[in-house]
Amino acid sequence: MRRQIVKMMIVIVAIFAACLLPQHVCFFIANQHPHILENTWFQPVYLAIYWLAMSNAMYNPLVYCWMNDR
């Protein structure tokens, strides 16, 4: 039982990291190179990254349902 809970938490943390890492990288790059904000491609890319970050909340119930025996 404990192993299953640990595996579930590892999956949840990995999904959280995968969803939010691109947003943090984008903020870091924009902070280091402010001129990048003026490019026309930046806004659609940022929007896609933002959607990925916010979609993290959707994955938690799916993982709980998938990894729960009951």
Image: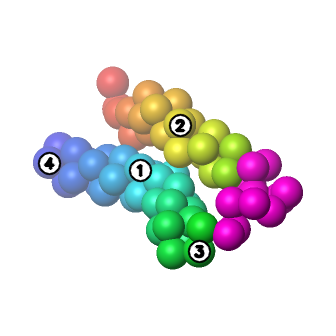
Q: Amino acid at mark 3?
A: His
How far apart marks 3 and 1 lie (CA) works out to 26 Å
Q: Earlier in the sequence, mark 4 or mark 3?
A: 4
Q: Is 27 colored magenta in this rendering?
A: no
Q: Nearer the viewer, residue 57 or 25?
A: 25
List the single residue furthest toward the left: 2
Q: CA distance from mark 2 to mark 4?
A: 29 Å
Q: Amino acid at mark 2?
A: Met
| Mark sitting earlier along the chain (1/2) | 1
Q: Crowdedness of circle 4 by 10 Å Cα count: few (<14), some, many (20+)? A: few
Count residues near mark 2 (Cα–Cα under 10 Å), then give few for <14, some for 14-19, many for 20+: few
Which mark is on residue 33?
3
Disc nearer the start of the sequence (3/2): 3
Q: Earlier in the sequence, mark 2 or mark 4?
A: 4
| Residue 54 shows in the view | yes
Instruction: Find the magenta span and give its range.
Output: 35-45
Q: Is residue 60 left or right of residue 43?
A: left
Please, is residue 50 above or below residue 11 in the view? above
Which labelled disc corresponds to residue 54?
A: 2
Label placed on residue 59: none
**Residue 18 spot, x, y in % from top left:** 49, 59
**Disc 4 residue type?**
Arg
Give neighbour class at mark 3: few <14, some 14-19, many 20+ (Cα, 10 Å).
Answer: few
Q: Secondary structure at mark 2?
A: helix
Residue 16 - label: 1
Q: Residue beneath label 4, please? A: 2
